[in-house]
Amino acid sequence: MKKVKKIKQIKKRKNEFPKLKEAILEAILTSVGDHIMAVVVVDRNGRIIRVNKGFETLTDWKREEVIGKSLVRVIPREDEKGRKVPFKKRILHKILSGKILASTATITTRGIEKLPIFYYVRKDKSRFPATSVVNPMSFAGEITGAVEVFYDITKEKELERIRMDFLSLASHQLRTPLSGIKWLIETMYRGVLGEMTERQKCYLDDIYKINEQMIRLVYDILSTLRLENEEAIIKKEVISVQSLFEDVLTLVSAAAKGKNVTLQNPLNHRTLTIETDAEILKAILGCFLSNAIDYSMPGQKVILGVREESGTVVFSVRDFGSGIPKREQKRMFERFYRASNAKNLKPIGTGLGLNIAKTLTEKIGAKISFKSEENRGSTFYLRIPKKSIKDVKVRNSV
Amino acid sequence: MNKVLVVEDEEFLIRALVDNLVADGYIVDIARNGNDAVSIIRKRKPDLILLDILMPKSDGFYVLEEIKKNPEWKSIPAIILSNLGEDKAIRRALEMGADDYFVKSQHPIQEVIERVKKYLEGKKAVKNRSCPRCKK
């Protein structure tokens, strides 16, 4: 008798199992993202079969109003300028048709992780910035539908705007007194206020140098912060390597002379051209050269070289100076990191130069690397495709 | 003698600019905000304007707009001297008709003065070209 009762109980539980599963699923969907994250499940034709509470909150649509309807029609997607994203370009369509396997909430553009921004239109036609993740549902090797999870990023966008406004104001407020010191000292150097004694000039030289370091520091810190946020405008132009070298060598010639370091560049690149953003390339090579000069001993040389390797142009800057201790080499591109022996040759440095160079490198689709030996010197390389920025585009998962 | 209008709200920058310009023989007017700048331009039309952007009351963009919409003023070279260094501000100023843009902390003052000279010499040269007989 007992056995029969137990079997009945098991059968009952078995019958209840799908309902229990359903209840669990409902509880998960409802609690996901505390009503600010929408979860929507569609069948293979993109028709809504399930939504959570977050979907209702974010879109103003009630569950019963949308079940069975096409998701892309219920929730139109727009780009930044308010243009409707066509159905075929929606990531959901691409996933349901098997063109792509899954999408993530972040994209990587030129090495910087960003949220792809688009807008979803609510029932009342108002819109909100959103980001989403879409994944297919597969059964027996076939795509049977998809799940899209999206959330409202109004707050993130607002924070980004506040951050940029702050950066802009902070940079202005920091630069103004520094430019005042700079210009007043330069006016004194000019002798407008009369001649100065050698000792006075000496003091003024020191103040001027400290101020220039501060200007550099402010510039570097703000560049780093800005590069993270902003989609800098990348220009594309054909430039001759020879004129590029002339420009960068002029930039650092005063520093090299001051330190008694000889700059060398073999003349094997007279006809070589490269298609990229000249200013960014100059900034990267300028950073390599300044570092090479800073970490060389007086009387040493720094060699700026270039060679071509199957569609890639390889720039190199070699010095014979202090080098980087092996155990610290991994950290050289970290923000604010300075090697333990760097202070001996350059007491004040920002530790930002190579970090900025690396970010810039990624912006033009190039690669940065180095080899170094302590007390023997370093060689920094920049590998850049001859047509470097042809395919570098921001990809939005629309 | 050429007249240069310095539009700047920071006293220490005014001092540096004025001392250099006067040493080079220019007549200098000073305005400490955008409104003052426009009224000085009206009274004593300058040959060149050095223009800050962020100032109290009305900013450099306002001055630029006023200059460029007035047919009598629009040919006055306007060089922006600002510590706003982002692309957005630079692009806006150049699109509005600014002739040059210096981020102050990134350029020696002498570079600015040289640019002033270049513009004013250029102006002279244009004048000469338009009246070739004067040369004879």
Image (cartoon, rainbow, N blue to C red):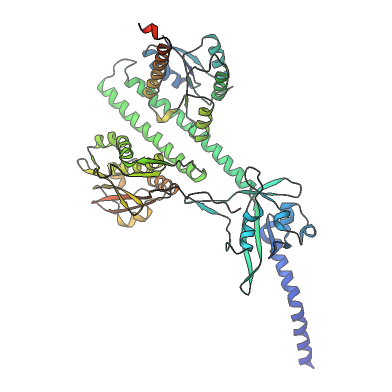
Dividing the picture into quadrants, the one containing residue A210 is top left
Q: Quadrant of the N terminus of chain A?
A: bottom right
> Percent from the top left, x then y, of residue B97?
52, 24
Q: Is residue A232 left or right of residue A127?
A: left
- Foreground: A230 or A377? A230
Q: Can residue A352 be spotted in the picture?
A: no
> Percent from the top left, x then y, of residue A233?
49, 41
Query: Would you place residue A353 above or below residue A52 in this image?
Result: above
How many numbered discs, if any?
0
> Percent from the top left, x then y, of residue B28?
45, 12
Query: Would you place residue A11 above or below residue A362 in this image?
Result: below
The residue that appears at 57% across and 16% down in the rendered structure is B70
- Farthest residue to the bottom: give it: A1
Query: Would you place residue A3 above or below residue B105 in this image?
Result: below
Q: Is residue A337 left or right of residue A372?
A: right
Q: Can residue B135 be spotted in the picture?
A: yes
> Percent from the top left, x then y, of residue B23?
36, 13
Dividing the picture into quadrants, the one containing residue A329 is bottom left
Dividing the picture into quadrants, the one containing residue B69 is top right
